Amino acid sequence: MEKETLYKFFDGKASRAEKEAVRTWLESSPENEQELFREREFFDAMILSGSMKAAGMEKKSRPFYRTALLEAIKIAAVFAITVACGTYFYKSEIRKIGEAMNTITVPAGQRANLTLPDGTNVWLNARTKMRYPAAFTGNKREITLDGEAYFEVTHNVDKPFVVQTNKCNVEVLGTKFNVEAYGDSEDFCTSLMEGAVRVSDKEEPSESIVLTPNHQVSLINGHLQSKPIADFDPFRWKEGLICFKNMNFKELMARFEKCYGIHIIIENPKLTDYVCSGKFRISDGIDKALRILQKDAKYTFERNKDESVVYIK
């Protein structure tokens, strides 16, 4: 890391990009943290000794070697203060960065892709809200999720990655997994594609399950239950698709509700046992999907006045 960038960071004049560069460099190795403290100590000492010069406390006729010696004494005199103050101010600055929280909300019928400060790649499904810090500064990388997201977590054995939901917490070191935990639904499911995760019930922390790849865990009747993943197509929502195979019509409508943020009331009793398979593009909208399905299922549908409810008759 260039000293000029570090000094601008210490002086509070670093740009957002430079702050991010310092954070990334700092987290890359323990040696960098020690180097930063050393530079902070020297920086603070120079400021203090420079203040003395500005106050006119130094004689111009003083020989150079004596000036250098006195400067060294000044630095040594403030060194003990600098060790404490430099560390305090640096940690305060980092803490300020870490305390700044970002919130991203994905509207109904859309999805989003972003990279977190640690390099973790995240896909967010429709009607999902995620909060994450501007920098992961503690001994854990914690984010909160309300909705559905797919994570490709950057490996860091010293800083576990934790996804907090209103029902369960998911803790990982480095892996690929999907979490579905909408706040307005009783459903919770975590599906693991690669690596390992530990899922803990927030109400019963002692109840936890460590997943192995190609398995998923759901919260059923207050208990965590694991099973193999039978079909990976549902996770293609990252590609903008709703995929379903031999799915009950009611279950499919529940998925539409989550995706499009609309309430669906099934009034046609003939659809109770209707099972269907297929895939739709999320961007095509719910009306097009319902029109395609009604060719085979034989039903009609209409919306209420504010279009927040769909009635299937």
Image: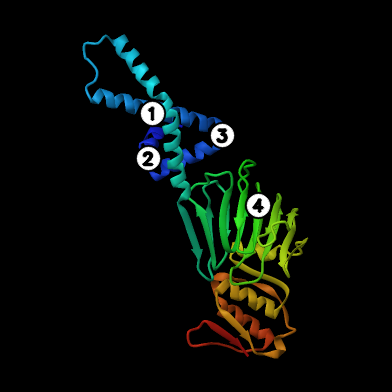
Number of numbered discs: 4
Which type of secondary structure does the marked residue at label 4 adopt? strand
Query: For mark 4, what is the residue?
Result: 171
Identified at 51% across, 47% down, the residue is 117
Which amino acid is tagged 1?
Answer: Phe
Disc 3 versus disc 4: distance between alpha carbons?
22 Å
Which type of secondary structure does the marked residue at label 3 adopt? loop
Q: Earlier in the sequence, mark 2 or mark 3?
A: 2
- Residue 18 on image: x %, y %: 41, 40
**Nearer the camera: disc 2 or disc 4:** 4
Disc 2 versus disc 4: distance between alpha carbons?
33 Å
Query: For mark 2, what is the residue?
Result: 14
Identified at 75% across, 62% down, the residue is 229
Callout 3 touching callout 4 (CB < 8 Å): no
Callout 3 touching callout 1 (CB < 8 Å): no
- Residue 116 on image: x %, y %: 53, 50
Callout 4 touching callout 1 (CB < 8 Å): no
Tell me where residue 220 sits by quadrant: bottom right
- Image quadrant in which the C terminus is located: bottom right
Disc 1 versus disc 2: distance between alpha carbons?
15 Å
Checking the image for residue 43, the label placed there is: 1
**Is 95 placed above or below 110 here?**
above
Disc 2 versus disc 3: distance between alpha carbons?
21 Å
Tell me where residue 148 sits by quadrant: bottom right
Disc 4 versus disc 1: distance between alpha carbons?
39 Å
Query: For mark 3, what is the residue?
Result: 29
Q: Earlier in the sequence, mark 3 or mark 1?
A: 3
Q: For label 1, count other residues whose C-alpha is less than 10 Å away and answer few (under 14), some (14-19) or many (20+).
A: some
**Is 129 placed above or below 212 here?**
below
**Nearer the camera: disc 1 or disc 2:** 1
Q: Nearer the viewer, residue 63 or 275?
A: 63
Identified at 22% across, 15% down, the residue is 59
